[in-house]
Amino acid sequence: MLWLPVVVALGVGVAACGGSSKPTVASYDKSASAICRTYNSKMKPLGQELSSASSKAQAEKALDKAISVVKQGTGKLDHLKLPKSPSAHLLAARRDESKAVSDLQALSQAIKSGSASKAKAAAQRFGQDDKAINNAWKAAGVKACGGSGGS
């Protein structure tokens, strides 16, 4: 039973290493901004690919890629620990990032079904939600996540 105190001591040591500590606002901003810059740079060519698509198949392919990139980026943001006292804007931005994914998925479905009216409505919803998300990020002080294509 000599190993028991060692295991307990190691467990206490690991817990004391700050594995569950909250980052500072500045640290969170730095991490979130790095994620957003990475995924914004991945989205830019996909936006160009989507806007220049000359067929439904090309548009679907570009949109599917965009959905994947947005999911990856929001997933990375979701795994960041929030600062100790996150602002309401930061909480709103984090909460609403999933709306961008849902909107893009609705747009994809509308394009695949051939419904121009549903596609237009989904694109408008995405534009509105994306603007609100970007404004929330900016208000939270995480400007790299609140730029053009910030979500």
Image (cartoon, helix red, strand yellow):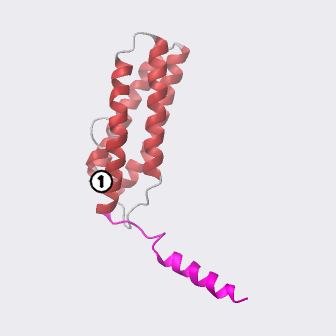
User: Total label count?
Assistant: 1
Looking at the picture, how far across and down is residue 74, in whole percent? 44, 44
> Amino acid type of disc 1?
Ala
Secondary structure character of the magenta stretch overall: helix
Residue positioned 36% across, 56% down in the render: 88
Task: Find the magenta span and give its range.
Answer: 1-25
Q: Dot 1: what SS? A: loop
Residue ranking furthest to the right: 1
Residue 65, x across and y down, in percent? 46, 28
Direction top: furthest residue? 54
Where is 115 relative to 147, above or below? above
In this picture, residue 5 sits left or right of residue 65: right
Q: In which quadrant of the rendered image does the N terminus lie?
A: bottom right
Q: Residue at x 47, y 54 (%)?
A: 79
Left or right? Give the position of 112 relative to 125. Answer: right
Residue at 48% across / 69% down in the picture? 19
Quick one: label 1, few (<14), some, or many (20+) residues within 10 Å? many
Position above or below: 107 against 31: above
Q: Nearer the viewer, residue 5 or 89?
A: 5
In this orientation, which residue lies closer to the viewer: 145 or 99? 145
Q: Quadrant of residue 7?
A: bottom right
Q: Quadrant of the C terminus?
A: top left
Q: Is residue 21 magenta?
A: yes
Identify the residue shown where x is 34% and y is 27%.
Answer: 45
Compared to residue 90, the image places residue 23 above or below, namely: below
> Which x, y percent locates residue 147?
27, 40
Q: Which residue is mark 1?
A: 140
Q: Is residue 41 magenta?
A: no
